[in-house]
Image: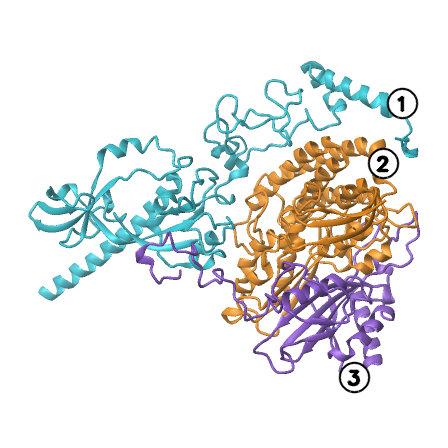
Amino acid sequence: MSNLGTTVTLAQNEEAANECLEAINSRFAGSGIVASVERHSNAKKYAFIRITTPPQHWQALAKWMRFDLEVNYCSMVTGTHFPEGPPERGWEVAYHFLRQPISNQLPDTNTVYVAEKLDGYLVPMEFEVLIPLENNDSPTVPTVQHIWGGADWNEKETWDLVGIKFEGHKNMHRVLNPHDSPEGFHPLQKQHKIRYHDHNEMYDDAQGFGRKPADEGRVK
Amino acid sequence: MPMHPHAKPNFRNLFWYPFKITLITALRTFPIFGKLFGKRLSGGYHNTTHPEFLDDGSASRASRSSEFNDISQQEFAPDRVTSDLFPTLWKPQTVQYPYERLEDMEPWLFVPGNYNGRIGVIWETCTACKLCVTACPNDCLHMTTELRVDVLDGAEGEHGGMGSELEVGGFAAKQIEEVAETLDDFNHVTAHSDTPDQWRFAEVLDLSGSTATVRWNDSGAEQEVETSELFVADDQIVSGRIDLGRCMFCGLCMEACGFTSFFMTNEYDGMSGFSRQDLWFDASRTRVLPSVHQEAVDSELAKRANKERDKRAKKAARAAKESA
Amino acid sequence: MAQMWITMGPQHPMTHGLWTLRVKVDGETVVDTEAELGYIHRGVEKICESRDFTQVTPYCDRLCYVSAMTWANSYIYAAEDLLEAEVPERAEYIRLISAELQRLASHLMWLGAFGPDIGNLTLMTWCMRDREMFLDLLQELGGSRMHYNYPRIGGVKRDIPIGFADRMIAKVKLFERRIDEYEMMLDESTIWLVRLQGVGYANAEEMVEAGVSGPNVRAAGVNYDVRWAHPYSVYDEVDWEPAVEKPTSVKGADCYDRYRVRMEEMRQSCRMVLDAIEKIPGGKNTNYANGDEMIYQKAPTRAPEGASGFSNYECTRGASQFYIQGGGDGRGKNPYRLSIRSPMFITIPFVAKTMIGYKVADIPAIMGSFDPCIGETDR
C-alpha cells in the first residue's frame, strides 16, 4: 500500500490488547468484572478484549471505558434468551464496541493515519462486553444511552425484539415491531415459534386448499 | 438563484466542453475519422482493440446466431454501446427481447452450471436420497412417486431387455404415436406447460402368450394388446415437485446433489402462472436440456444394465452349479 | 407561522426505502424530525435460528439487496470465526474482487438515485448504464444480478470463469474514464454545488459517538476504514488508499463532501480490483473446479454451545457486524442466536437529527447523501 494508511499489524494489535487488559485489571480487579484477550479464528486472527460484568457494575465500567480507555464507538447491543440455561445466566446482553482513533477534527484537514505509527490508545481495538442476567421473567440492565449515542437505538431494538429492559433509558419505544404490538411480546424469545416457517413443519398453503389427499398428515 | 462562488460562468464550462464534445461526436460518426482519430478523440475506450472475449465455451454455447447476432463478428463493447453497422457511432444496444435473447448474444453470462436459473432434474438418475429436500432453506421441494416407464425398462439396443418383465397386477404403457412428432417443435424453455403425454398407462390384468389383457387408466376399458407394443411401467418411480413461488434460486439444492441429477439450468423463462398452484412445477416441467439429459441418462442406463446383467449372469452360474 | 408535522410516509419515492420521516416544519424550515423504521422487518434473525449455517447465506444477501455480496461476505467471516474455518488465499482474493465490484455497483445505484433527488435526471440513466457492466460481471461470477449466494464458509462457491478477468479489466478501465465524465458534469455544476454545499453538516466526533461509520464519517476527514483498522481478507496486499475528504467547515462534512467521498471510493475500488486480479494466486485465467482446495476448504458444520463469533466488515454503507452464538437446533447445526448490526440502523436516526435547521427542500439532499438502504436497517 502507499503512504496513506497501511493496515494495523498483528504486533500492534496484540500490544494494544495487552495494554487494555492491564488497564482493566488494574482498575477493576476483584470486583466481579472479568476481562480476557481473545483471538478471532477468522481472517487475520486478530485479538479483541472480552469483558464479562455483572449488571450492577456496568455503568461504572462503561463510563471508565468511554472516557479513560477512549472507546468511542458503540457498535451493537444485543440480547439472548437462554430459557434452559443456568439460573445465573438466563439472559445475556452483549455489547460490542470499537475504539476509533479520532479527536478534534479541524476544518480543511483530514486525519491521515500511517497505521504502523499508531500506538497506545490510538490503535483500533474491538471490545465485547457480556452481561449475564438471572433466569427470571424481567431481565434488567442499566442503560448506557447517555454515554454512547450509538447505544440508543440499539437498546431500543434489543428491548423490542428480546425483551430486556434498560433501566434509565429515555424514550423507549418499539422500533422494528409495529408500535401497537402487544405488551410483553418480544419475538426473539425462545418460546415463540415461527408459524408455518419452522423448518420441519411448513405447509404450502395455510388453509390446505391445494393439498392432495395422499399428502394427509405429511409434513415434508 | 445567486451564482455559487465556486461556479462562476467561465469559458471552459459554457463553451469549450460543449463544443469539444459535439465536435468529437460528429467526427466519430464518419468511419474514416473515427478509425483514424478514434483513439485520441474518444479518450481511449471505443475503437480500441479489445481482448478476445470468446473463450471456447462461449463460442460453442452460442446456439442460435443469425447474421446480425453472430457474436464472433461482433465487436465487443464493455457497455454494449456500439453497433455492427456503425462501430464509431454510439448506439445503445437494447436487446430486442423476445426476438433476440441475451443468452445468444452474451453466452458467458448464462453458463448453465453457473447461472442461477430454473431447476432441472434428471429423474431417471435420481436416487431419492432427499439431500436436496433437506438443503433447501425455504422448503420448496417435495418428493413423491409417480407412474412412469423406467429408463431401463424402455431401453432398446445393447442395454435392452435388462429391465423387468410384464407381470399381472403390474402396470404397462403404450406409446402415443401422434405426440412423438410434435416433441421436436416443442420448446419447453418458453412453453408454460409441460410436454404432452407420450405414454398411455394401463394395468395388466392377464398375460397369455403374446397378448396381454389390460385395463386402460384413462378410460377404464379393458383391451387385449400385443405384448410387443407394451413397455413395462412402474408406479414407484421417484418424482417430485418444486414450489417456484417459494424458491429463491440460491442453488443449495444443486450443490447438495453433487451435480449428478439436480441442476440449475440457464433458463429464466416459462415460469410464470396465474395462480400459486401454477407455480408448482412437477417432474415433467423440470426437464433439463436434452443434450445434457441424454448423456447422463445413457451413462446411468449403462450402469444399471450392467448391474442387472451381472446379477443375471451370477444367478445363471449358481443355477448351473446346482444342477450340475 | 404555525408549526406542522408532515409525514414523508413509508411510500415515498425519495426516501430510498420504506421508512417514515416525520418532519415538523415552521414555514419552510425543519424544526424537528422523527424517524420510524420497521416497515420491512422480515425477522431474518429469528428465521436464521432454524437454518443451517450454509442455508443462512442466501438470507444475508437479501439484507441490503443493493449491496448483497458485501453482506454475504460479512456473515461468512462471522461464521468462520464461530466454526473456526480456514480459507485458501485464492478464495480471499476472489472475495475481495466480488466485494469491490459490488461496492462499485452499490455506489452507482446510490448516485443514480441521488442525482434525480437533486434534479439531475441524466445521472439516473448514466449510472444505470454503467451499473449494468458490474451487474453483468457479478452475474458471471455469482449466477444472478442481485442475490448470488456466492461465498461459502471456507471459501467461495466457484472459481472465476475463464475470460472473466479480461472482461472485467476492460469494463473497469472504461468505468474509470466514466468517473471522469461524471465529475466533469457534476463537480462544478452550479445547481449541484448550491444544493449540496453548506447543507447537512455532520460533525466527525458526533458521528462516531452516534455510531455512524463508513463513507459518511470519512467525508468528515476521519480516516477510519475497517479494511485497515481490523483487517480481513487480503486488503493489506492490494494497492489502495482509503478515500477521505477534507471537510471545509468546522461544522463538519456537508452533502458535497459525502458525494466526493463516494466518487473517490469508486476510483479506489477500481484500483483495488485491477490490482487484485493481477496478484491472484493461481492466475487470472485458470478456472478451478467447484470445491477444489484452491478455492474452498471444507469447514466444520456444527458449533458447540457456548461458542460465539463476530466479525467487523466494511460494508458499502458503514461497518457491519454479525454476532453469532452457536449451539442451536440440530446439535449445533443451526445458530442459537444470529445478531446483525446494520450501519444504517444507527445512521438513519442520526440523519433525521441532521436535517433540523435546514429547509424542506434540503431533506432529499441530506437523506440521499447518507445513502440509506432500508433492507439492512430493518432486517
Vertical comparison of C207 with C137: above or below: below
Q: What residue type is disc 3 on?
A: Ser
Residue to which mark 1 is pinned = B11
Chain depicted in purple:
A
Residue to which mark 2 is pinned = C193
Q: Are marks 1 and 3 on the same chain?
A: no
Chain depicted in orange:
C
The residues bearing labels 2 and 3 have C-alpha atoms spaced at a distance of: 56 Å
Chain depicted in cyan:
B
Quadrant in which the N terminus of chain C appears = top right
Q: On residue A31, which mark appears?
A: 3
* Residue C37 location (% of width, % of height): 68, 54
Label 1 element class: helix
Q: Nearer the viewer, residue A75 or C32?
A: C32
Q: What residue type is disc 2 on?
A: Leu
Count of numbered tags = 3
The residues bearing labels 1 and 3 have C-alpha atoms spaced at a distance of: 72 Å
Q: Residue at x 16, y 51 (%)?
A: B166
Q: Residue at x 34, y 49 (%)?
A: B123
Q: Residue at x 79, y 84 (%)?
A: A31
Quadrant in which the C terminus of chain C appears = bottom right
Q: On residue A107, which mark appears?
A: none
Quarter of the image for residue A216 reads: bottom left
**How many neighbours does mark 1 have within 10 angstroms: few (below 14), some (14-19), or many (20 or more)?**
few
Q: Chain of mark 1?
A: B
Nearest to viewer (mark 2 / mark 3): 2
Q: Chain of mark 3?
A: A
Q: Nearer the viewer, residue B44 or C19?
A: C19
* Residue C15 location (% of width, % of height): 71, 45
Q: Residue furthest front?
A: C2
| Residue B259 seen | yes
